[in-house]
Image (spheres, rainbow, N blue to C red):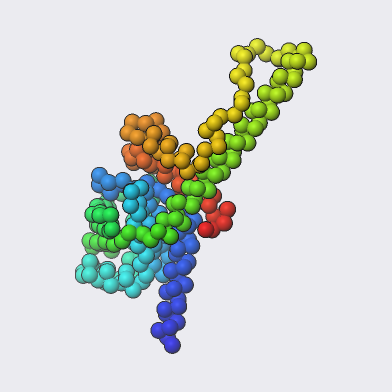
Amino acid sequence: MLGQVQRFRRMEGSEDLDSSLLTQPWASVCFGESTFIAKACFRETGYVLLISDLSSVWYERADTDVIGKRSKELNKRLTAHVSSFLNRLSNLMCPLLEGRESDANSFSCQQTPSKLTIHVKSELSGLPFYWDFHCPAAAVEMISRHLVRPLIRMSLALQYQLQELASLLVQKDVEIEDYRESGAALSRESAPAVRCRGRPGIHKHPAASLHGRGQAGGEGSAEAAPLRGCRDPRAHLVSAAGLIGHAGLSAGKG
């Protein structure tokens, strides 16, 4: 009976972590020469980490049992409660995701399309502290919930705003023409306005437009602005993904 209760609590904790992860924004992080986008959530029941290089996506969820076992394997000289290790990991990762790095901590990684391992070297209670995040490839549903659906929502919202602006310009063109035909003069001199007749690209599929802009923003592009200090030309896309993380929730969780 006790074992069933513990399993239920672990499942409940995992669902809480996954739900909380949806509310976290994406951030750009650098591990050595490699740049990623990542989001993470730490709770008393464990942690969840989602990370991507925009080619592959990796994911790890670790509960207290996994953390306790791994900490004993990596830190044989350290004896502490699991909560201490969780708190230390949170204090290491959260500042990193906020763009505040510390020279006292060392991060490195090994990656393949199917697995990403992040090595951490720090200190805990005056002793060396080591940790490895073992992140296998994320499931398609996870990628869809955290990347694809939010991007589609934002693209549709931007397309709607663009259409609204185009309609407003056409309306203003008609008003200006009515003023001129009635003999009214403009209040100030200005260059002749070009009549807005709508742009063919407005009605393109949002995903296609987004894909085109992504290809255009290559190395050296003005659109490839660094995010939180990382000079990654792809990081500009991350700022949009971070913004729509919350926009996607307001539209309803997928």
The residue lying at 32 percent from left, 33 percent from top is 219
Q: Quadrant of the N terminus?
A: bottom left
- Asked if 119 appears above or below 236 in the picture, the reply is below
- Asked if 30 appears above or below 201 in the picture, the reply is below
The residue lying at 22 percent from left, 70 percent from top is 73
Q: Residue furthest bottom?
A: 1
* Figure label count: 0
Residue 88, x across and y down, in percent: 34, 61
Residue 25 as seen in the image, left or right of residue 111? right
* Residue 133 showing in the rendered view: no
- Asked if 222 appears above or below 40 in the picture, the reply is above
Residue 155, x across and y down, in percent: 51, 43
Query: Where, by quadrant of the figure, is residue 179 drawn?
Result: top right
Residue 31, x across and y down, in percent: 28, 49
The residue lying at 75 percent from left, 20 percent from top is 178
> Which of these two is toward me, 70 or 124?
70
Q: Residue furthest right?
A: 182
Query: Where, by quadrant of the figure, is residue 87 drawn?
Result: bottom left
The residue lying at 45 percent from left, 51 percent from top is 148
Residue 167, x across and y down, in percent: 65, 32
* Residue 19 showing in the rendered view: yes
